[in-house]
Image (spheres, rainbow, N blue to C red):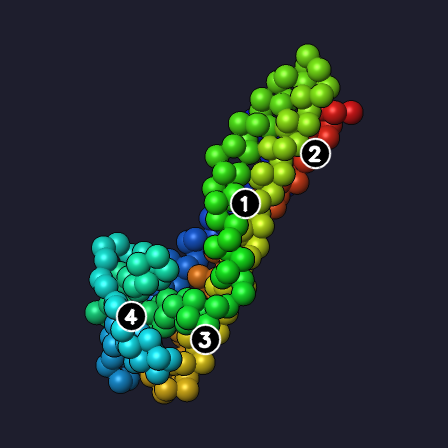
Amino acid sequence: MYIDWTYIVLVLPAVLLSMWASSNVKSTYAKYAKVFNARGITGAEAARRVLDANGLRSLPIEMIDGELTDHYDPKANVIRLSAGVYGGRSIAAVGVACHEVGHAIQHSVDYAPVKIREAIVPVTNLGAKLSVPLIILGLLLASFSPMFTYLAYIGVALYGLCALFQLVTLPTEFNASRRAVASIEGMELLRGDELEGTKKVLRAAALTYVAALAVTLMQLLRFILIVGNRRD
């Protein structure tokens, strides 16, 4: 879509926030990746202990390439940790690894937001592919008949599904971090200032999801305004 006042006023500030959040999580992770934990445990070891404590002894942990590529794969039922987290003995490594364990625990206990998120994935993927093309097509054809404006509104509604997906993602991420911190503290994997450093890493990571949602919501509002003005 073109750049106009709606983009500059609504979307651009959210984009700048998203860029800052991305830079912030990288710098925060880099800072605490240099702080080694007193117990000398690796991210993989911490993850294994928390998994076992929650009855997930058979769930495997794998090492993958990249940085901050850590994730839980629900389809394969496996936790994948980047090399720096898998073998790292930093407080950042422990925090990130336990956060991914938090997602695995969510699936094992049928955490509601996870179920909702999985249920809307197909329609969300459809919305991501068709929303903008339908908006553009609807606006172009509206020159011939106002009825085509409804095609653009369908595109807006599909884009709204993307916002819904990201909205449901927020409690999933925050809850995974809360589970991670509770496990780390309860099992005394980290203590005192170490735990505070880990919390900062997880908060920085969570902010990236907040920023991404802000971008999508502002873009959604922008599309509503554009289509609404065309209809008028």
The percent position of residue 150, horizontal first and vertical second, equals 68, 27
Kindly report the distance in space between the C-alpha atoms of the residues bearing marks 1 and 4: 30 Å
The percent position of residue 190, horizontal first and vertical second, equals 35, 83
Kindly report the distance in space between the C-alpha atoms of the residues bearing marks 4 and 2: 48 Å
Mark 1 = which residue? Answer: 162
Answer above or below: position of 147 versus 162: above
Judge depth for marks 1 and 4 and give the one in front: 4
Which of the numbered marks, if any, corresponds to residue 222?
none
Mark 3 = which residue? Answer: 179
Residue lying at the far right of the rendered structure: 232
The secondary structure type at the circle numbered 3 is helix
Answer above or below: position of 35 versus 171: below
**Image quarter in which the C terminus is found:** top right
Q: Is residue 212 left or right of residue 8?
A: left
- Near mark 4 (Cα within 10 A), the count class, few <14, some 14-19 or many ≥20, is some
Which of the numbered marks, if any, corresponds to residue 225?
2
From the viewer's side, name the closer residue of 198 and 148: 148
Q: Of label 3 and label 1, which has the lower sequence position?
A: 1
Q: Quadrant of residue 186?
A: bottom left
Kindly report the distance in space between the C-alpha atoms of the residues bearing marks 1 and 2: 18 Å
Judge depth for marks 3 and 2 and give the one in front: 3
